[in-house]
Amino acid sequence: MSDSHDLGKAQAPSDDALILDLDQLEEGRHEREAELSPAWIAEALSGTDASVGEAGTARLEIDIQSDRTVLVRGRVALDYTVPCARCLDPAKVDVGAEVGDLCVTYVPAERLRVWAQVEGGSEDDDDIDPLESEELDQIGYQGHVVDLRALLAEQVLLTYPMRALCERGEACRGLCVHCGANLNVAAGTSQGEQSDDERCPSCGKRLDGRDDEGADTPWKRALSKLGGKPPTS
């Protein structure tokens, strides 16, 4: 799991909360809480069309075992907006995502190197990656410091939704397929009102995609150039 974002340019969460010095921590469970600044969240979501205006929080449970394996679980709470999938108005994304659904484990890199050798890996390979599917939730670390910021940034990115709707929800009417006008705010048609001949208030064209009889449309002009006749409605 690698951090693909230059998060150092944004104000990072508290080092005390997300950078663990194992020489200074006893075995057992530790609880950490960190504030995630809007700039840091925006950097984690860079490459998307999300807009961030408020800070978030991360609450983590960290279990340090006697062999220096570190288990991380917790919760990220934040919100941001993305364009509505229908009308492109802001759609709020309210996140209360579990971190550690896969039970993320930090393991000393030397141990992963031994595993890699057992599986036929090269001893000189500095890029140590778990080789088995059940080990994909294990991350190697060097020395006595475990930095959780990359993990947290990736979890924030994973909260980006596949599809989000504005505050209108399923009542959102979207955009006119002809002129792109927002049908929620265009004048002349009440929201939710539908008819067999419903038209866009901005361009006057039918919203059901059908052509008016006799209307000159691009597909009719193209067909006429080929010597064909468009079907009559």
Image: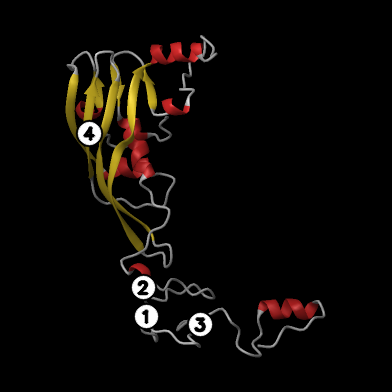
Q: Residues within 10 Å of mark 4 (few under 14, many from 20)?
A: many
Quarter of the figure that contains the C terminus = bottom right
Quarter of the figure that contains the N terminus = top left
Q: Residues within 10 Å of mark 1 (few under 14, many from 20)?
A: few
Quarter-wise, where is residue 141 in the image?
top left
For disc 2, the marked residue is 171
Q: Earlier in the sequence, mark 1 or mark 3?
A: 1
Dot 4 amino acid type: Leu
Q: Earlier in the sequence, mark 1 or mark 4?
A: 4
Q: Secondary structure at mark 4?
A: strand
Dot 2 amino acid type: Ala
| Mark pair 1, 3: CA separation | 19 Å
Farthest-out residue, right: 227
Residue positioned 39% across, 62% down in the render = 84
Q: Nearer the viewer, mark 2 or mark 3?
A: 2
Residue 192, disc: 1
Q: Secondary structure at mark 2?
A: helix
For disc 3, the marked residue is 203
Compared across the picture, whether 223 is left or right of 8 comes to right
Q: Nearer the viewer, mark 4 or mark 3?
A: 4
Dot 3 amino acid type: Cys
For disc 4, the marked residue is 60
